[in-house]
Amino acid sequence: MTPPLSRKRFAFLAADGVEEASLAGPWRVLDAGGGMPELVSSGPLAGGRIRTMQGLRFVGSRRADLALSDVADVEEYTGVVLPGGLVSADAMRLDPLAVAFLRAAVSAGKPLAVMGHSAWLLIEADLANGQLMTGAPSLRTDLLNAGARWSDDPVVVHRSLLTAQGAAHVAAFGAAVRQFLATGVSAQGTRRIDWQKEEMPS
């Protein structure tokens, strides 16, 4: 039987300053499951590379597979992942193209997996209203003001949205992303992901 992620394309939308761990973790999970993750860059890049961070330090860089401006249609992707990182998220929420891409993905019914500060984009795109979700704890008031229902759980799945709190929950986020994108999403209600029972590929 063909694995559910086999040959499926997933857009990892990020900008300079993306959190290394929250990019690498779910990327490794989808790749190991036969999926095809692609790093899609928001904003201008030096040499076509996105710099990654750990905490407040730049620790490396990754070459982007393509720029957001080169994505012809959101339908090319099975799902969208927004890794964490305050610097990256702050840049993306000010990028009209990133906001438009996210709205198009939701309109097309694509599942979204969002980590930490990247929940800012949901606010900017007017997509947080009515969602049960989590995110970086510092965003709690912003999300509530945008109409979201806040959860203190480290990982939350509601309808077609998966959210996670931050760097301390990268392993949980990666494991949840695999289940979430492999099994599809419920049109209504909240679905629990048993990420505690999942193991990250080495």
Image: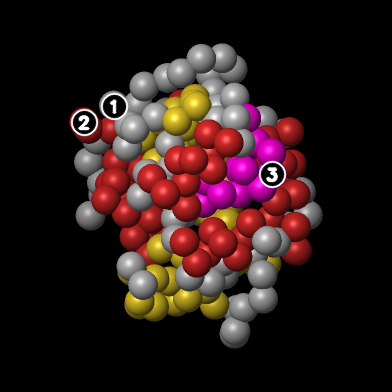
* Image spot of residue 35 (x, y percent): 47, 46
- Identify the residue at image location x=53%, y=18%: 186
Of the residues under marks 3 and 2, which one precedes in the sequence?
3
Question: Would you identify the image quadrant in which residue 12 lies?
Answer: bottom right
Front position in the image: 2 or 11: 11
- Identify the residue at image location x=56%, y=49%: 120
Please, what is the three-letter code of the amino acid marked with disc 3?
A: Ala
Pointer 1 residue: 194
Within 10 Å of the Cα at label 2, are there few (<14), some (14-19), or many (20+) other Cα atoms?
A: few
Pointer 3 residue: 125
* Image spot of residue 8 (x, y percent): 55, 43
Question: Would you identify the image quadrant in which residue 173 lies?
Answer: top left
Please, what is the three-letter code of the amino acid marked with disc 1?
A: Asp
Please, what is the three-letter code of the amino acid marked with disc 2?
A: Lys
Q: Is disc 1 in contact with disc 2, using a CB cutoff of under 8 Å?
A: yes
Pointer 2 residue: 197
Q: How many marks?
A: 3
Asked whether 120 falls inside the magenta stretch, the response is: yes
The label nearer to you, 1 versus 3, is: 3
The single residue placed furthest to the bottom in the displayed view is 47
- Identify the residue at image location x=70%, y=61%: 95
What are the residue bounds of the magenta stretch? 118-129
Asked whether 98 falls inside the magenta stretch, the response is: no
Within 10 Å of the Cα at label 1, are there few (<14), some (14-19), or many (20+) other Cα atoms?
A: few
Front position in the image: 37 or 168: 168
Q: Is residue 21 visible?
A: yes
Front position in the image: 127 or 190: 127
Of the residues under marks 1 and 3, which one precedes in the sequence?
3
CA–CA distance between discs 1 and 3? 29 Å
